[in-house]
Image (cartoon, helix red, strand yellow):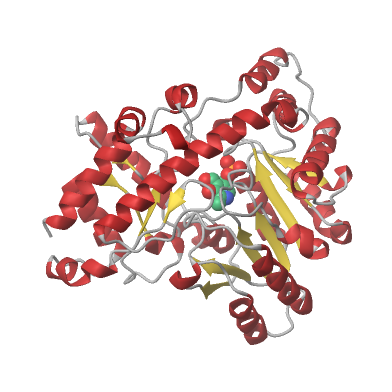
Amino acid sequence: MKQSINPFVTELKESATLAINQKVITLKKEGSLIFHFGFGQSPFPVPSSIQKALQENTDKKDYLPTQGLPELCDAVSKFYSTEFRYDYDSDKVCIGPGSKELIFQIIYLLEGPLLIPSPSWVSYGPQASIRGKETVRIPTKRANHYRLQADELDQTCRRLGKKQKILIFNNPSNPTGSSHTEEEIRELAEICRSNEVIVICDEIYALINFSRHRHFGLAEYYPEGTIVTGGLSKSFSAGGYRLGVALFPKAMDLVLSSLKTLISETFSAVSTPIQYAALAAYGSYSSLKEEVEKCTSIHQFAGEYLHQRFIKMGLNCPKPEGAFYLFPDFENFCSALQAKGVETSSQLSELILDQSHVAVLPASDFYMPPSHLGVRVASVDYNGAKVLEEFPGKKNMDFQKTEELFPKLVKGCDHLESFLKNL
Ligand SMILES: Cc1ncc(COP(=O)(O)O)c(C=O)c1O
């Protein structure tokens, strides 16, 4: 039978993150030892109180309101107020099946181009393309650790003129691990305000922050124009539970009511037992804080270990300040790589996987020009349950303990190092 598909969808390729994970699974099945620095999933167990809440609520079978379980919306509003000083009322909170779906639906319903700092997370562009929406990349600089600067945003806004613009702003960042300073956030807020930019602040990594300063969000300095998204996937290690949250400013009732309509015509509401499990996370965060902070300190150790190894190898790489990613480039090996026929970051990633069995994602999947010889590295290839139990704190880690708790990070770096030496 002849099948005709929406051309906006046929033009998309499979998300690079999922594709590399699939390739790694296949290689592993064939018996290869792979250092999986490609897929960014929290390695830790779901905290037991969240699992328990899920078990205790399997009898809850009724549909919930499209916006979400009212007690959960209330807990989310309080959580953001206590942890990040954000002021979002509980009736402006919306629960979805992962923040990815919420971001998609918000992008879907808002008119105007989507401004995407490059580098940024893989899925924003395809989500806009599905709707046939124009995307505008804003290049950032390695010297600023790829953090979006106010003048870069301002130039883009001026070029686009008066029409409505949406900025997707991920802080801390996947793929770079960078996190914005308070001054940068203040300056960005000013530009957003003067250009009336609607910001979707993707803060899925907000609790995984190890920079010198606390987490600063645009919601604090530009509350009237900032929609915040987050969820259970990263800091609560429950990606597969599929629960995300979005918080809307008072002045964006039209966006929220439109989203509720869209939800009512699509997924209806998030699974009821999962919403009760999320209530155990957001409603009792004080009892989980210690565990979340321990996971964060482990992410910090792993990120800093990789960073120091990368610098020693001769790669350029901003020091990670949050999330669980690094964004090194191989510019110093440009000639040797070109001699091997490597002109693009996807060729580079393929060569690294083939020759050193280290899986990484090409920088081009994060909106960098193909000729930027960089990759995205995820720092989570270790046994999270074991490390959570045995991690003695950064100060008490030595080489032997690092090898014992993070064997694949150590060996993966060794492989990468000899790959570079033999170029
Ligand atoms: C930057 C960023 N935003 C959003 C998401 C989506 O998270 P979820 O849909 O699991 O809430 C991810 C997941 O990898 C991410 O890295």
Q: Quadrant of residue 138?
A: bottom right
Q: Is residue 163 left or right of residue 132?
A: right
Residue 97: x %, y % from top left: 65, 38
Residue 20: x %, y % from top left: 35, 46
Q: Residue at x 62, y 19 (%)?
A: 48
Toward the viewer: 31 or 260?
31
How many numbered marks does the figure carry? 0
Residue 24: x %, y % from top left: 30, 39
Toward the viewer: 370 or 112?
370
Q: Is residue 116 left or right of residue 409?
A: right
Toward the viewer: 72 or 149?
149
Q: Residue at x 26, y 61 (%)?
A: 314
Q: Is residue 211 left or right of residue 405?
A: right
Q: Residue at x 85, y 48 (%)?
A: 92
Q: Quadrant of residue 69?
A: top right
Residue 329: x %, y % from top left: 33, 63
Picture quarter with the C terminus: bottom left
